[in-house]
Image (cartoon, rainbow, N blue to C red):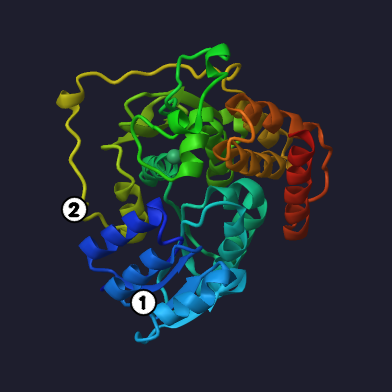
């Protein structure tokens, strides 16, 4: 049976690779959504014939509609459009690969409607983890992680649901600046930070990998997805990005998942689960690698990791504060308005804001605003 897929964020790195997977697996694309990349969304619409498309940025709505006027496709816009696609139960699975906190409401809309989710939007779990996992349980909705590490952990646990999980070993590439001192990080430019050694990804996540914020956000994600405490997660630097993560059980037996560093594998598994089919990617040859290396991260240099761990340990809205501050700081760094080191400094400093309100959608959105105002007051 061919599955019907909705992809939110189809023009991004995950979205375009998901479409490669759809093509190779013969999935039907039911709906597509992008922020404002009109040209690419148009060519995707012509190639995959979705029934509905959403161009989220309303300023692009009219011109995009004109572009696809000859096609039998319904065009939507705005956050409402994204949520409508997420909640459309015609699809068998909704892949949320939207970038940033904007992805939270579509995630909630999909779960509310009872749609199975493939989740690539980190911010959804980082900011709204309690809400999302609680609602998913209530609605009996399955969430398949798309992030390579979380997919790995999910796969490691698959055959061991009856075993108690002791610990998660979350692997990290270490980014392009692994081994550098704080002093050496002083004059890092966006161009240098945008060069990742192993993974080809969007700008936001590439910068997050360079600061190790990405790993911090992934720890928070893992806490929610797998129901573990933050101190049950150990970040291990693994430069080759071949071991995508591991789990340790009570007997200290460790199970890991390996593969070439290509996002198409975890994307495909989230879509084909529980089946596995040949993936349009290379095979892993361990002999070609020769050796795999592991090391401890340096949270005193890469202090974003420290901030994320402090935030999830405090819980509540603190992960939202850290995440939102980071989201804005990465944008400012790319615009050369803050330095590389300021990202880490301010992401830590935002934790001095007190926010002990309960985690509700309204409070998440106001904490997001609070964090942005804090950052803007400092730069
Ligand atoms: Mn990852």
Label 1 lies in ligand 1 vicinity (Cβ under 8 Å): no
Residue at the image position 25 percent from the left and 54 percent from the top: 276
Report the front residue among 13 and 86.
13
Q: Is 45 positioned to the left or the right of 104 in the image?
A: left
Q: Quadrant of ligand 1?
A: top left
Report the front residue among 153 and 20.
20
Which secondary structure, mark 2? loop
Label 2 lies in ligand 1 vicinity (Cβ under 8 Å): no
Residue at the image position 55 percent from the left and 43 percent from the top: 221
Up/down of 42 relative to 15, above or below? below
**Front tag of 1 and 2:** 1
Mark 2 lies on residue: 278
Up/down of 48 relative to 158, above or below? below
Residue 109 horizontal/vertical position (percent): 59, 69
Q: Which mark is residue 375?
A: none
Residue at mark 1 to residue at mark 2: CA–CA distance: 24 Å
């Amino acid at each position: 049976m061919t599955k019907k897929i909705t992809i939110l964020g189809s023009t991004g790195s995950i979205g375009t690779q998901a479409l490669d997977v759809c093509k190779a697996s013969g999935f039907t694309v039911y709906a597509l959504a992008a922020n404002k990349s009109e040209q690419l969304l148009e060519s995707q619409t012509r190639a995959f014939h979705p029934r509905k498309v959403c161009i989220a940025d309303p300023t692009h709505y009219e011109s995009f509609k004109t572009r696809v006027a000859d096609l039998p496709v319904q065009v939507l816009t705005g956050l409402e459009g994204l949520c409508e696609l997420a909640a459309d139960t015609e699809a068998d699975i909704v892949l949320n690969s939207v970038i940033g906190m904007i992805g939270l409401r579509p995630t909630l809309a999909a779960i509310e409607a009872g749609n199975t989710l493939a989740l690539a939007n980190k911010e959804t779990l980082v900011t709204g983890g309690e809400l999302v996992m609680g609602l998913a349980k209530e609605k009996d909705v399955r969430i398949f992680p798309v992030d390579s590490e979380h997919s790995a952990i999910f796969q490691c646990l698959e055959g061991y649901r009856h075993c108690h999980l002791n610990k998660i070993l979350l692997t990290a590439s270490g980014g392009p600046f692994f081994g550098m001192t704080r002093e050496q990080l002083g004059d890092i430019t966006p161009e240098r930070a945008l060069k990742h050694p192993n993974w080809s990804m969007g700008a936001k996540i590439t910068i997050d990998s360079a600061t190790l914020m990405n790993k911090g956000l992934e720890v928070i994600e893992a806490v929610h997805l797998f129901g573990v405490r933050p101190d049950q997660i150990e970040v291990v630097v693994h430069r080759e990005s071949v071991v995508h993560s591991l789990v340790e059980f009570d007997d200290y037996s460790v199970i890991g998942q390996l593969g070439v560093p290509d996002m198409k594998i975890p994307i495909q598994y989230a879509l084909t689960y529980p089946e596995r089919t040949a993936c349009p990617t290379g095979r892993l040859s361990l002999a070609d690698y020769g050796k795999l290396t592991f090391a401890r991260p340096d949270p005193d240099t890469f202090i974003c990791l420290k901030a994320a761990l402090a935030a999830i340990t405090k819980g509540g809205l603190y992960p939202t504060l850290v995440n939102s501050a980071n989201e804005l700081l990465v944008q400012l760094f790319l615009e050369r308005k803050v330095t590389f080191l300021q990202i880490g400094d301010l992401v830590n400093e935002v934790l001095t804001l007190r926010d002990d309100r309960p985690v509700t959608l309204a409070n998440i959105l106001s904490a997001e605003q609070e964090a942005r105002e804090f950052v803007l007051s400092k730069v």
